[in-house]
Amino acid sequence: MRKKIGVLFRKTRKTTYRFERLQTCKHCHTYHVLWETHCEECGREYQPIRKLSAAVTRRYVQTRFLLLALLVCLAVLCAKTAAQLAAACGVGLLLLGLFVMIQKKYGSYERDAQFMSYLTQEQAAIRQALVHHLEDVGLEVKAGNIKEAYEKTREIAHFIDSDTIKIRKIMFLNHFILRKDMELELDTLVPSTYDKDFVAYLREVVKVQPSLVKKSVLEYVRRYKSYILLQENGEQLIGQVLGAALRMKPYVEQYQDLFVEFIDYIPKDRLLRLAKMIRTHRRAGWELLYAATKKRIDTQYGFDPDFAGVL
Ligand SMILES: [Zn+2]
């Protein structure tokens, strides 16, 4: 087995929207999704994409306001009598006032709509930036910088959801010693088909950060159970994943079949927790799980004081 290395990952940015990760160089019309602050071509500072789009929208609103003002001026100039002039001024002011009011109230919707169409227009340039970053990852791998390769792929993966990217990330991650304090991922890595490297990663990650086990992982385990069982200690791995899933009652409910089947492989402390859960949440539909848990406790921990009177 390859020797694993200890690493300290670069902190990732948390954003509400994916597009907030996009930076752009207005001068070169290029995009950037990594952590550089200045354009590698021209050296100018990257701008957040929203800022650029806001400027586009502002120009658009200003143009419309000017057009409206021009129309009002025309109406005023065309007025022949004092009454017409008063009407033109009155209506004109009312229209301009209305325009400002509508902009204030609904401007944000318009900004969003504009921004979406702006993003659509920019798709090709954004894709080109991602391709460029992927080439960069290739160079990092060649140079043996697996940590950088992973960190870059992690950023790119926010924009490309494919098995190829996931499997690459998994392969990189399998080079590292995983720790509790690391910012690790799991459900963003679940591939659509069976992957041995993913299972190897799952085995490591479940030991250090069991809270990462979520529905997608449980689905994966259920779907590829027969493949996992072909691996060395496959049963133990499933038992550990289930032990981690125990923290959420709905998971126990939804994956009861797995719990029943692999009850003998759930680690002792987790089994105790499961037994306590079953005791406090006895409900219809849990009979099989109750019976399986009780059977294992009776046969294996019959004289263990930890389990005395639990079930
Ligand atoms: Zn530039």
Image (spheres, rainbow, N blue to C red):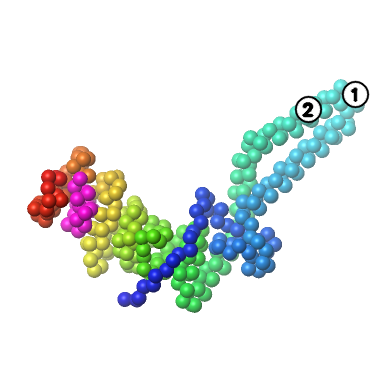
What numbered label is drawn on residue 91? 2
What numbered label is drawn on residue 311? none
Name the image quarter holding the N terminus. Answer: bottom left
User: Is the stretch drawn in magenta largely helix, strand or loop?
Assistant: helix
| Chain-order first, disc 2 or disc 1 | 1
Q: Secondary structure at mark 1?
A: loop
Is 83 or 241 nearer to us in this picture?
Answer: 241
Name the image quarter holding the C terminus. Answer: top left
Q: Residue furthest right?
A: 80
Does residue 190 appear in the picture of this structure? no
Label 1 Cα crowd, 10 Å radius (few <14 / some 14-19 / many 20+): few
Q: Is residue 64 above or below residue 122?
A: above
Query: Which residues are the magenta region?
Result: 257-276
Total labels: the figure holds: 2
Corner quadrant of residue 124: bottom right
Which residue is found at the position 45% from the left and 61% from the top? 162
Q: Which residue has dot 1 on it?
A: 81
Q: Residue furthest bottom?
A: 143
